[in-house]
Image (cartoon, rainbow, N blue to C red):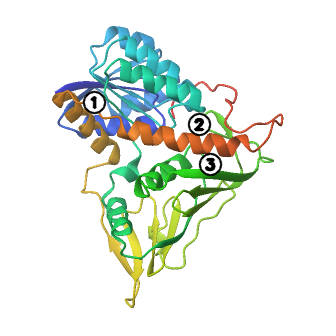
């Protein structure tokens, strides 16, 4: 059984804490966050683990096999490098790897050079419904793809990176050849430690000719005419083909499909009870460690998506308030 710990006890860190606790391949032993409120919350949920205000102290004092880094994006790389100095057997790194491509590329190179297996938990890469959608699209169940639209009520960097990773994976033969974007930053929105758009549209043109349009920002309202209201969780995807349509919500565990002459139908493919996508990634990491075969697929896809986001954000221009730059630091490190 591998020992595990989490740095950063916000939303993303909480998902890793639960996953470590619920997996029979791990023993959760520690967590770190400078926020006393965050530590108190973790203590209530996990009374038998050690808690630290300083992650460096945790790394020095605990014998850790796997470390999950779930802090705000500007600190991911620096904290992961400190963790690497302690020679863990594996890392889980929350997305994005860094707010900028140069830092993310350097981090991933260091992780590879250390021979340390690493995963980035992009849920759509493992959720059953999304993998079935991927198989249907690749198989041509709705014919040739005409258009892809994503409506996302969160920013492109912190949530949109999930959708980009998934679509890069689905359309693996269609490399991006052009990215165009327009953003409104008048609301001065900060999410996960960086400045992001209040509303925006990003268009990604693939070499195959497929065009992917992303509507993002907290002023975006995703709505669907075919998905039940309870199925409209997170971003909404609409993939139109020459012979049908697939529509789905990112985390709902289901999708709506109409193909050929058939009527549209909602198909449910939820995760088994008690299983989360963080747990699936951590158990994949445990298997990579056991096999001695590091797999960086999720990290490479995450980096590819970040390249698109950086290209889009750079089109905002050099104003005083720029997309993707760190905001003033908060006390909590939780993502």
Whether the residues at callouts 1 and 2 have beta carbons within 8 Å, the answer is no
Q: Earlier in the sequence, mark 1 or mark 2?
A: 2
Which structural element holds mark 2?
A: loop
In the rendered structure, the answer to whether residue 86 lies left or right of residue 187 reads left
Whole-angstrom CA distance, mark 3 to mark 2, is: 10 Å
Q: Examine the rendered structure and indicate whether residue 115 appears above or below residue 234.
A: above
Residue 113 location, x and y as percent? 37, 19
The count of marks equals 3
* Closest to the observer, 153 or 181: 181
Whole-angstrom CA distance, mark 3 to mark 1, is: 31 Å
To which residue does mark 3 refer? 155
**Numbered circle sitting on residue 294:** 1
To which residue does mark 2 refer? 192
* Closest to the observer, 34 or 296: 296
| Residue at left offset 65%, top offset 42% | 311
Q: Residues within 10 Å of mark 2 (few under 14, many from 20)?
A: many
Whole-angstrom CA distance, mark 1 to mark 2, is: 28 Å
Q: Examine the rendered structure and indicate whether residue 234 appears above or below residue 227.
A: above
Residue 56 location, x and y as percent? 44, 12
| Residue at left offset 41%, top offset 81% | 258
Residue 95 location, x and y as percent? 48, 38
| Residue at left offset 75%, top offset 36% | 322
Which structural element holds mark 1?
A: loop
Q: Earlier in the sequence, mark 3 or mark 1?
A: 3
């Amino acid at each position: 059984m591998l020992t595990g710990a989490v740095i950063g006890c916000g939303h993303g860190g909480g998902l890793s804490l639960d996953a470590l606790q619920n997996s029979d391949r791990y023993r959760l032993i520690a967590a770190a966050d400078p926020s006393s409120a965050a530590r108190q919350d973790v203590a209530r949920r996990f009374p038998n683990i050690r808690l630290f205000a300083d992650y460096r102290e945790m790394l020095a004092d605990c014998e850790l096999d796997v470390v999950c880094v779930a802090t705000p994006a500007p600190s991911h790389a620096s904290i992961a490098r400190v963790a690497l100095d302690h020679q863990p057997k594996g890392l889980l790194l929350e997305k994005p790897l860094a707010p900028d491509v140069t830092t993310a590329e350097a981090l991933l190179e260091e992780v590879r050079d250390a021979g340390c297996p690493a995963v980035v938990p992009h849920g759509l890469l493992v959720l059953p419904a999304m993998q079935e959608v991927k198989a249907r699209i690749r198989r041509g169940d709705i014919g040739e793809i005409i258009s892809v639209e994503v409506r996302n009520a969160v920013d492109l960097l912190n949530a949109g990176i999930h959708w980009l990773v998934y679509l890069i994976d689905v359309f693996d033969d269609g490399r991006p050849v052009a990215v165009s974007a327009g953003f409104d930053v008048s609301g001065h929105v900060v999410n996960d430690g960086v400045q992001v758009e209040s509303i925006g549209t990003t268009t990604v043109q693939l070499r195959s000719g497929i065009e992917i349009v992303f509507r993002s920002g907290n002023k975006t309202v995703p709505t669907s005419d075919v998905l039940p209201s309870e199925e409209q969780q997170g971003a909404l995807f609409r993939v139109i083909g020459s012979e049908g349509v697939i529509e789905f919500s990112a985390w709902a565990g289901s999708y709506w499909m109409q193909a050929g002459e058939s009527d549209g139908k909602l198909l449910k493919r939820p995760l088994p009870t008690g299983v989360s996508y963080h747990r699936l990634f951590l158990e994949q990491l445990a298997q990579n460690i056991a096999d001695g075969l590091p797999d960086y697929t999720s990290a490479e896809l995450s980096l590819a998506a970040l390249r698109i986001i950086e290209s889009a954000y750079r089109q905002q221009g050099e104003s005083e308030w720029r997309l993707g730059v760190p905001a003033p630091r908060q006390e909590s490190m939780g993502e």
